[in-house]
Image (cartoon, rainbow, N blue to C red):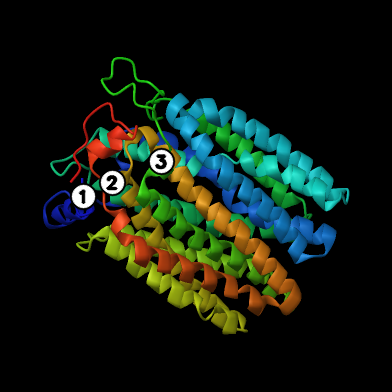
């Protein structure tokens, strides 16, 4: 299953009779049984960081402090999410999700109580660690369900379903739709009702949506225990998806994407405060996320003949170029337009990277691989929130906008240098390292 296989399958569909479009994807049997609860369960993910920033900034009066608490949450999520993904691959999604959402609700309640009681910073950090560690990774779990249904059970002549890229695009659009709604909803709740209202809504939605999603057992991927009984390769130990070089390169790329999300959130909040219109923050961030969503819709509908590695590099180069001017813009209309352009450039990189995961990682480690990418976004976001918060406190919002530029430029340089590692590896070599399939998978 080479890096050209997905493109060939989609192009063949485009020239033939069975186009791999959204309509065909959504007619996949049982898809809606996990899509609807999955959407509800992932909505809070987009609310968490901005809700923490708005609450702690209100109680402490400092964007730097607020960014630091949000960063601890993000770092904790980045470190623990892949471990949760590994357990979900091994034990099943429900076994990980149910205790996770319960722990998250308790942790959010503790963080709320501490922030509102003006607790010291170390106490906020102590509560932020379990809050981030317990964030349910519903997005990667939904992607793993798509990959199991389309990649393993519906393989075509080329070794993969032409719907895989469409599914990756659909999930990117869904993610960005939550990032359109989430920050706007959190900002409206925090500014219109109470500074704690956003975090309360996040915890409530996580609990309800997560339990509902966990109840959909029929579509969850088959667990892959550490040793598959009767398998000739069962003696080989399973290792982390991060042992695949291409996954490490993609994780670095997603650090850069996280720097855009984190830097935009803090810098747009600071910019809105500077112009005396705090409510503009939700609108501006919503326009940025809407650009990402619209690009995802179009990108997923196109039958690309260009290989995914070239698409990834082109998308990332455009993202870096668009982010390079954010610091120089000082008006709401111009910032909204440039934010829209930045958003338009994110989707191609996200969608292509998630599509590449299917060609790089076997099913037994797929959820873990997706959570490494999600965790990398969270880690990049955490670092960006901290850096942009400190810069915005010291030098204003314009300085904060330098963070997305620095993050994307460094990630682009890494992609250009290590792009050869994004080619699928030899299946025998992967199996020898312990990442085995129960059934053979065709690889170049």
Closest to the observer: 340 or 311? 311
Closest to the observer: 141 or 176? 141
Q: Is residue 333 above or below residue 162?
A: below
Mark 3 and mark 1 residues within 8 Å of each other at the beta carbon: no
- The N terminus - image quarter: top left
User: Residue 241: which disc?
Assistant: 3
Mark 1 and mark 2 residues within 8 Å of each other at the beta carbon: yes
Distance between mark 3 and mark 1 Cα atoms: 18 Å
Q: Where is residue 2 in the image (x, y as percent from the top left)?
A: 21, 49
Mark 2 and mark 3 residues within 8 Å of each other at the beta carbon: no
Q: Is residue 117 above or below residue 301?
A: above
Mark 2: which secondary structure? helix
Check disc 1: other Cα within 10 Å, few if <14, some if 14-19, many if 20+.
many
- Name the residue tied to disc 1: 2
Distance between mark 1 and mark 2 Cα atoms: 7 Å
- Name the residue tied to disc 2: 359
Q: Tell whether 414 sits left or right of 44.
A: left
Closest to the observer: 261 or 46? 261
Q: Tell me which corner region of the image, top left, top right, bottom left or bottom right, holds residue 80.
A: top right
Distance between mark 2 and mark 3 Cα atoms: 12 Å
Which residue is at a point 50% across and 75% down the rendered structure image?
Answer: 323
Mark 1: which secondary structure? loop
User: Residue 391: which disc?
Assistant: none
Q: Tell me which corner region of the image, top left, top right, bottom left or bottom right, holds residue 346.
A: bottom left
Confirm whether residue 192 shows in the render: no
Mark 3: which secondary structure? helix
Check disc 3: other Cα within 10 Å, few if <14, some if 14-19, many if 20+.
many
């Amino acid at each position: 299953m080479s890096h050209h296989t997905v493109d060939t399958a989609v192009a063949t569909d485009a020239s033939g009779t069975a186009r791999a479009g959204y309509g065909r994807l959504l007619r996949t049997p049982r898809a809606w049984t996990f899509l609807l609860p999955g959407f509800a369960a992932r909505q809070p993910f987009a609310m968490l960081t901005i809700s923490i920033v708005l609450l702690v900034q209100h109680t402490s009066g400092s964007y730097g402090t607020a960014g630091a608490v949000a960063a601890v949450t993000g770092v904790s999520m980045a470190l623990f999410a892949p471990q949760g993904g590994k357990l979900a691959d091994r034990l099943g999604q429900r076994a990980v999700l149910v205790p996770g959402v319960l722990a998250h609700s308790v942790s959010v309640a503790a963080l709320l109580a501490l922030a509102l009681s003006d607790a010291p910073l170390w106490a906020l950090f102590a509560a932020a660690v379990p809050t981030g560690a317990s964030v349910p990774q519903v997005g990667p779990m939904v992607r793993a369900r798509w990959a199991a249904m389309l990649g393993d059970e519906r393989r075509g002549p080329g070794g993969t379903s032409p719907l895989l890229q469409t599914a990756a695009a659909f999930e990117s659009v869904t993610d960005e739709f939550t990032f359109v709604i989430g920050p706007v909803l959190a900002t409206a709740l925090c500014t219109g009702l109470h500074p704690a209202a956003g975090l309360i809504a996040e915890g409530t939605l996580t609990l309800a949506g997560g339990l509902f999603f966990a109840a959909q057992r029929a579509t969850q991927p088959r667990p892959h225990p550490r040793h598959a009984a009767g398998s000739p390769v069962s003696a080989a130990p399973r290792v982390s998806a991060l042992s695949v070089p291409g996954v490490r390169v993609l994780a670095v790329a997603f650090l850069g994407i996280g720097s855009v999300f984190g830097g935009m959130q803090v810098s747009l909040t600071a910019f809105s405060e500077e112009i005396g219109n705090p409510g503009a923050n939700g609108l501006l961030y919503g326009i940025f996320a809407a650009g990402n969503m619209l690009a995802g819709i179009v990108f997923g509908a196109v039958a690309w003949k260009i290989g995914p590695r070239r698409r990834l590099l082109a998308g990332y180069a455009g993202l870096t170029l668009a982010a390079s001017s954010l610091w120089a813009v000082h008006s709401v209309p111009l910032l909204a337009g440039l934010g829209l352009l930045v958003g338009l450039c994110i989707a191609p990189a996200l969608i292509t990277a998630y599509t590449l995961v299917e060609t790089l990682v076997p099913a037994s480690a797929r959820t873990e691989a997706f959570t490494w990418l999600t965790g990398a976004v969270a880690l990049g976001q955490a670092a960006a929130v901290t850096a942009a918060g400190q810069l915005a406190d010291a030098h204003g919002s314009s300085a904060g906008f330098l963070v997305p530029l620095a993050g994307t430029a460094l990630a682009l340089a890494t992609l250009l240098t290590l792009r050869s590692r994004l080619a699928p590896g030899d299946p025998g070599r992967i199996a020898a390292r312990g990442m085995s399939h129960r059934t053979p998978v065709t690889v170049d």
